[in-house]
Amino acid sequence: MDFETILLFITASTLLALAPGPDNLFVLTQSMSKGAKPGIFVTLGLCSGLIFHTTAVALGVAAIFQTSIFAFNMLKFVGAGYLLYLAYMSFKSSLNSSVEADKSSLSPFKLYKRGIIMNVTNPKVSIFFLAFLPQFTNPATGSVTLQIFTLGAIFMLCALVVFSSIALVAGKLGNWFNKSKNAENILNKVAGTVFVGLALKLALSER
């Protein structure tokens, strides 16, 4: 792959990661309500989930989500259900006198796993990758499969940088809000509302 193609891909990937979407909103709400460090672990999970979508494109599995209504709907409803569960947990935390118990119960692994599930259960990411990644491949320069995996890895790095930056900024804002007990409850309610919105958006999405 030539340098110009890679540079163009990095630019496009960074802009896409910055554009408001389910993943960066997820990082934003998690970081504001739980802190920058938990947001980073969620980010690592989201980026790891992209391995699934990259592999799906490279192996042709992503085409199934594009052609099979059943497969697409099954995965998206699992994702919507998980988001509603996170919304319930956020609203539940807002009813407690403190969110410290909720923070302490979320280990780095649980946060990492939360990010993976959030990303993997969104079939639109696979369909997006199916349309996006091949545009930057060139069969004349070598294995398309290898190029797909390379592009997927670059996209993950771009997303990691962008989402980590969001987590750090949102974490600082969250720490400022968390000085007030009422603000903690508000943040959890906001997070819960965002999760409900993302769940509905995912459940009502079409291929």
Image: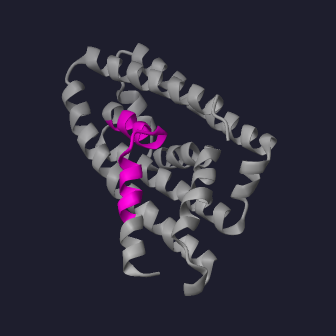
Q: Position of residue 158 (x, y in %)?
A: 38, 60
Instruction: Give the quarter of the image for residue 88.
Output: top right
Q: Position of residue 63 (x, y in %)?
A: 73, 56
- Residue 7 located left or right of residue 60: left
Q: Position of residue 82 (x, y in %)?
A: 61, 34
Quarter the C terminus occupies: top right
Q: Position of residue 199 (x, y in %)?
A: 57, 29
> Would you place residue 91 above or below residue 150 in this image?
above
Task: Check residue 160 for magenta coloring.
Answer: no
> Would you place residue 98 above or below residue 120 in this image?
above
Instruction: Give the quarter of the image for residue 11.
Output: bottom left
Tell me what residue is drawn at x 37 percent, y 44 percent: 38
- Residue 20 located left or right of residue 169: right
Report the magenta residues as a range: 10-31
> Would you place residue 161 above or below residue 115 in this image?
below
Tell me what residue is drawn at x 58 percent, y 78 percent: 146
> Would you place residue 111 above or below residue 155 in this image?
above
- Residue 25 located left or right of residue 182: right
